[in-house]
Amino acid sequence: MQNRFNQSKGGSAAQFIALIVAGVLVANMAPAQGLSTQGLTTAATEVKGAFTVVTNLMYAVCAIIGIVGAIQVYSKWSNGDPDTRKAAASWFGALIFAGLVVVTLTAVFGA
């Protein structure tokens, strides 16, 4: 009979056994780590504080998207570009998407 471990590409039985032993050791050590309630509360408070800042930043990004889009569309419209409607729809869609992402994240995670 042929040994299945020696047929693999570059692998050996010793490597396979070492991998299993490492997996068992990690699985046994993981529950010993433990989580403290105070640590989780502190982390949640810090995330909520950062979330408010990120939400305001995203609203500012939405405003910048709107201003840049309006300038781009006005530029195309002034030059008589036939692609003006497509550009306007693209920028408006990007603005709506960015706004909805902010509103959805606020609704899901709360601020």
Image (tube, rainbow, N blue to C red):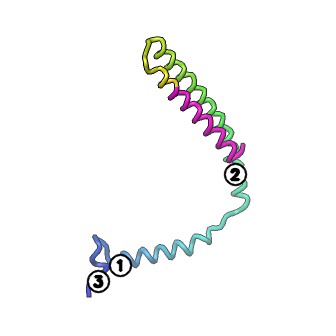
The disc placed on residue 14 is 1
Residue occupying image coordinates x 55% and y 28%: 92
Q: CA distance from mark 1 to mark 2?
A: 44 Å
Crowdedness near tag 3: few (<14), some (14–19) or many (≥20) residues, C-alpha within 10 Å: few
Alpha carbon separation for disc pair 3 and 1: 13 Å
Q: Is residue 35 above or below residue 73?
A: below
Q: Secondary structure at mark 3?
A: loop
Q: To which residue does mark 2 refer?
A: 44
x 67%, y 64%: residue: 35
Q: Amino acid at mark 3?
A: Asn
Q: Position of residue 55 (x, y in %)?
A: 65, 37
Residue that label 3 marks: 3
Mark 1 and mark 2 lie on one chain; the one further toward the N terminus is 1
Q: Mark 2 packing: few (<14 Cα in 10 Å), some, or many (20+)?
A: few
Q: Nearer the viewer, mark 3 or mark 2?
A: 3
Whole-percent x and y of residue 41?
A: 72, 55
x and y, in percent, of residue 33 in the image:
62, 68
Magenta stretch: includes residue 4: no
With 7 as the anchor, is 86 left or right in this view?
right
| Magenta-drawn stretch, dominant element (helix, strand or loop) | helix
In this picture, residue 8 sits left or right of residue 81: left
Three-letter code, disc 2: Ala
Mark 1: which secondary structure?
helix
Q: Taking 79 as reference, is 65 above or below it? A: below
Chain-order first, disc 3 or disc 2:
3
Image: magenta residue range: 89-111
